[in-house]
């Protein structure tokens, strides 16, 4: 997805394979300034900690205060998926080929596209030394865990809700109560697998900019012109647009789980970068793959 600022050049909204992109005018309306509450906007308990909006890993700054549980309880449960999605990352990767016995792991993989239409996988940190030997074999099976769409959208729902509070104060009424109930259900989940599916989060309009921030501010009230009508939302850290309204959303697809894919890999560069031929077949669920 790309977006045009009126009278400016197109801005790329996301990591995408080469090809046509959709464009929509983006109109910044108001830069939001920090606003600190005495009680947590999510649960109503005393607000004791300063909160980054959006999460700091996306470039957010301290914009408000929440309680300790609402501040820190979302990190590993949903915000990790948001960071992976934003970074274009695949987690828990394992490589396998006939050249080396067994599966070998790396840190999470960052996917990037080259101008000539190939994509490149970058292990972000340390890797099993045997991975270089596997990649050199050329014919590789890669298994990964992609970001979970429900969880990453719930993380964006939290940032959007806090942005509304910063702009207009803590809202009252049934719609706000529903949002708070869904956020509290996330906070109270014991583990990531227990995070409930959110129809509100599913119905948000989400656009992402890949590159330098559109605006060097944490939270900006903005409007995106879609095909039928403008959509009011917030631009987070100059990179992610989230609508203030939700359509309610269609049924959330089942989590993909582990995905397996056969790759024809080019020569690694210093054992850390592998270029891959373009237009690979779709990833398959491990549960449903042949054999």
Image (cartoon, rainbow, N blue to C red):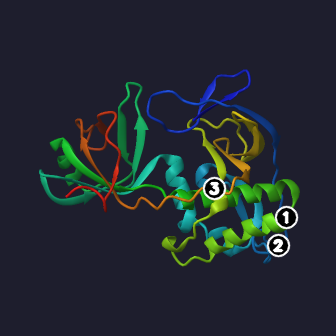
Circle 2 residue: 39
The label nearer to you, 3 versus 2, is 3
Q: Position of residue 218 (x, y in %)?
A: 72, 47
Distance in Å between CA atoms under marks 3 and 2 = 30 Å
Circle 3 residue: 249
User: Looking at the image, which residue is at 84% across and 66% down?
Assistant: 37
Q: Position of residue 237 (x, y in %)?
A: 67, 45
Instruction: Using the image, determine if residue 124 lies above or below residue 176.
Output: above
- Looking at the image, which is closer to me, 130 or 220? 220
- Label 2 sits on a secondary structure element that is loop
User: Looking at the image, which residue is at 54% across and 78% down?
Assistant: 190
The label nearer to you, 1 versus 2, is 1
User: Looking at the image, which residue is at 72% across and 55% down?
Assistant: 160
Distance in Å between CA atoms under marks 1 and 3 = 24 Å
How dense is the environment of label 1, judged by Cα within 10 Å: few (below 14), some, or many (20 and up)? some
The label nearer to you, 1 versus 3, is 3
Q: Answer whether labels 3 and 2 touch (C-beta < 8 Å).
A: no
Number of the label disc, if any, that sits on residue 170: 1
**Residue 93 visible in the picture:** yes
- Label 3 sits on a secondary structure element that is loop
How dense is the environment of label 3, judged by Cα within 10 Å: few (below 14), some, or many (20 and up)? some
Q: Position of residue 22 (x, y in %)?
A: 59, 31
């Amino acid at each position: 997805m790309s977006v045009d600022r009126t009278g400016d050049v197109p801005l790329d909204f996301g990591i995408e394979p080469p090809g046509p992109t959709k464009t929509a005018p983006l109109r910044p309306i108001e830069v939001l300034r920090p606003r600190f509450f005495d009680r947590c906007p999510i649960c109503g308990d005393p607000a004791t900690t300063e909160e980054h909006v959006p999460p700091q890993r996306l470039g957010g700054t301290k914009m408000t205060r929440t309680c300790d549980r609402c501040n820190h309880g979302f990190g590993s449960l949903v915000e990790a998926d948001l960071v992976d999605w934003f970074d274009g990352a695949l987690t828990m990767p394992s490589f396998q080929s006939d050249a080396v016995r067994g599966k070998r792991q790396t840190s999470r993989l960052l996917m990037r596209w080259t101008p000539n239409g190939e994509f490149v996988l970058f292990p972000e940190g340390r890797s099993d030394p045997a991975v270089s030997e596997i990649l050199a074999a050329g014919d590789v099976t890669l298994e990964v865990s992609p970001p979970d769409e429900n969880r990453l959208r719930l993380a964006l729902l939290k940032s959007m809700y806090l942005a509304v509070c910063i702009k207009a104060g803590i809202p009252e009424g049934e719609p706000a109560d529903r949002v708070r109930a869904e956020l509290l259900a996330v906070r109270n989940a014991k583990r990531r697998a227990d995070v409930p599916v959110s129809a509100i989060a599913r119905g948000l309009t989400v656009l992402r900019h890949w590159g330098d921030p559109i605006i060097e501010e944490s939270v900006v009230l903005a409007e995106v012109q879609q095909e039928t009508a403008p959509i009011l939302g917030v631009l987070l850290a100059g990179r992610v647009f989230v609508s203030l309204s939700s359509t309610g959303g269609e049924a959330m697809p089942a989590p993909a789980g582990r995905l397996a894919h056969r790759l024809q890999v080019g020569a690694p560069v210093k054992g850390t970068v592998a270029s891959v031929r373009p237009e690979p077949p779709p990833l398959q669920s491990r549960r449903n793959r042949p054999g």
